């Protein structure tokens, strides 16, 4: 050290967070935002050394799933990620219910990375790739035709995206007479419920009206596929087939195109539709059936030539295994914020690889979740592409503050991995968050002391 260097200048080159063994969790707080692209509950895990770890509850989930775990994590060393995950994993569940455990798990990885000064992918075994291929879910604004969708996808390709996804399903033909058969009156009821869909920004409704709309929507859209008695007619199949033909006519056959949101139709109709669109060389057909129907997935996979994909609602590695063993999927599509987090997703990817199955990753959240997924994607060999829902959200990148990450995370269809510790996020931009708070859940990082002492005798065996 030269004499003219100040103490502060010296300190700038020294890690002040250099005691990982003594790191302890002191607080956990939340901020709920809307529109990035959906409802996200962002998490800060505070420590006794000034380090803050960032996490996020799964899109559209309730932060309650994370809050209830606070008392079990306070005072613990966040670097003991797997130990803490095993302590809280019984309190997670499928789909949004996995959001609390998973969202906190990624914050632990962020803290461990920051404490030791290394990126998360490095703690997972290192990189298979330096940049992460992103794919865009794409919607058409205005009249939905195959040609309009083709043009929207073409625009994505011009922006640099090398992998595409769109919706294809009964939602696109429900207003055309003669395309669907269903118990008379049922389709009208579905249309009515969708038209009046619950909108949290509509504050002219009373609480009772809001609850009523929400419950009606829930009831009709929670009839599982085999029980709706909706069947697609030859006219309906013709229209859906033509839609994909029109899309391919615009974008060509060289770019991978995945398809999602078929609607609640049973196995036989999935097969009929799948056979019609096999010729369009699709990358995968996603969530055609509820993922729990393992044998139906196996039948579907045997009946069509297009790769079958599911996984965004599956919690824990053990619940992916039956689908893989049955040969029901060619691509899995876990969400890091549902599976149990970063390490569980890496393990799921590695298990799928043993079955010759590729891993794409579902993601519809803020840059926090996106980066968590990107680190797993970098460190898992059979990774294919990571979902990106926020092309049209101009403030999405502004949520985070980082001295090491590119200002725009997704560039030319890829995320470039860096050497930044943890997730690579220095802080969150409260000014931006304040502009996008959830209308019913206002407040920025408010105290959660009332959750400090929740606990129960919750061992699952005696
Ligand atoms: Mg999906």
Image (cartoon, rainbow, N blue to C red):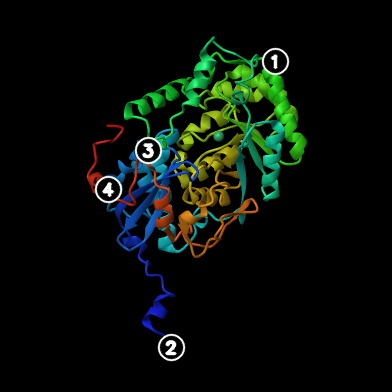
Tell me if residue 450 can be seen.
yes
User: Residue 165, how many percent across, how many down?
Assistant: 63, 38
Give the side of residue 453 with respect to residue 337, left or right: left
User: Residue 75, how many percent across, how many down?
Assistant: 27, 53
Mark 4–mark 1 Cα distance, whole angstroms, equals 56 Å
Give the side of residue 148 with respect to residue 181, left or right: right
Q: How crowded is mark 4: few (under 14 residues within 10 Å), some or many (20 or more)?
A: few
Vertical side of 139 occupied by 209: above or below: above
Mark 3–mark 2 Cα distance, whole angstroms, equals 54 Å
- Which quarter of the image is occupied by the N terminus? bottom left
Question: Which circle, 2 or 4, is nearer the viewer?
Answer: 4
Q: How crowded is mark 3: few (under 14 residues within 10 Å), some or many (20 or more)?
A: some
* Residue at the disc numbered 4: 448
Dots 3, 2 in contact, CB < 8 A: no
Quadrant for ligand 1 reads: top right
Q: Quadrant of residue 440?
A: top left
Helix, strand or loop status at disc 2: loop
* Residue at the disc numbered 3: 62
In-front residue for pair 325/107: 107
Please count the marks in the image.
4
Residue 234: give its label: 1
Q: Quadrant of residue 15?
A: bottom left
Specify which label sits upstream in the sequence, 3 or 2: 2
Helix, strand or loop status at disc 3: loop
Mark 2–mark 4 Cα distance, whole angstroms, equals 47 Å
* Residue at the disc numbered 2: 2
Query: Farthest front residue?
Result: 204
- Residue shown at the point (70%, 15%) measured from the top left: 234
- Which quarter of the image is occupied by the C terminus? top left
């Amino acid at each position: 050290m030269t004499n003219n260097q100040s103490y502060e200048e010296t300190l700038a080159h020294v890690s002040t967070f250099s005691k990982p063994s003594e790191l302890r969790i002191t607080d956990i707080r939340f901020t709920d935002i809307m529109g990035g692209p959906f409802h996200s509950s962002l998490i800060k895990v505070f420590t006794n050394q000034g380090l803050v770890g960032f996490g996020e509850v799964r899109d559209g989930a309730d932060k309650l799933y994370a809050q209830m775990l606070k008392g079990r994590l306070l005072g613990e060393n966040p670097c003991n990620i797997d130990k803490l995950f095993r302590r809280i994993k019984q309190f997670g569940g499928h789909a949004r219910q996995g959001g609390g455990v998973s969202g906190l798990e990624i914050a632990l990885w962020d803290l461990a990375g920051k404490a030791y000064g290394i990126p998360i992918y490095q703690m997972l075994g290192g990189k298979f790739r330096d940049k992460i291929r992103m794919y865009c879910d794409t919607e058409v604004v205005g009249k939905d035709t195959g040609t309009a969708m083709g043009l929207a996808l073409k625009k994505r390709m011009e922006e640099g995206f090398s992998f595409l996804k769109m919706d294809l399903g009964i939602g696109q033909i429900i207003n055309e007479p003669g395309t669907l058969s269903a118990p008379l009156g049922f389709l009208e009821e579905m249309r009515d419920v969708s038209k009046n869909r619950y909108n949290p920004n509509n504050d002219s409704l009373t609480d009772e009206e809001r609850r009523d709309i929400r419950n009606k929507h829930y009831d009709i859209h929670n009839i599982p596929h085999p029980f709706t008695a909706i069947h697609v007619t030859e006219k309906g199949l013709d229209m859906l087939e033509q839609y994909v033909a029109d899309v391919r006519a615009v974008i060509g056959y060289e770019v991978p195109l995945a398809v999602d949101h078929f609607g609640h139709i049973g196995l036989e109709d999935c097969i009929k539709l799948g056979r019609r669109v096999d010729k369009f060389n699709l990358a995968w057909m996603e969530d055609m059936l509820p993922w729990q129907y393992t044998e139906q997935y196996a039948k579907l996979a045997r009946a069509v030539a297009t790769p079958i994909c599911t996984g965004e609602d599956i919690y824990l590695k053990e619940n992916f295994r039956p689908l893989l063993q049955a040969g029901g999927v060619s691509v899995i599509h876990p969400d890091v914020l549902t599976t149990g987090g970063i390490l569980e997703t890496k393990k799921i990817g590695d298990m799928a690889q043993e079955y010759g199955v590729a891993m794409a990753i579902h993601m519809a959240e803020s840059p926090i979740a996106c980066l968590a997924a990107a680190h797993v994607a970098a460190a898992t060999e059979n990774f294919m592409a990571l979902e990106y829902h926020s092309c049209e959200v101009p403030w999405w990148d502004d949520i985070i503050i980082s001295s090491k990450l590119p200002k725009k995370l997704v560039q030319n269809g890829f995320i470039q991995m860096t050497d930044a510790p943890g997730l690579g996020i220095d802080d969150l931009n409260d000014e931006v968050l304040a502009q996008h708070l959830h209308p019913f859940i206002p407040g920025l990082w408010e105290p959660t002391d009332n959750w400090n002492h929740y606990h129960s005798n919750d061992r699952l065996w005696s």
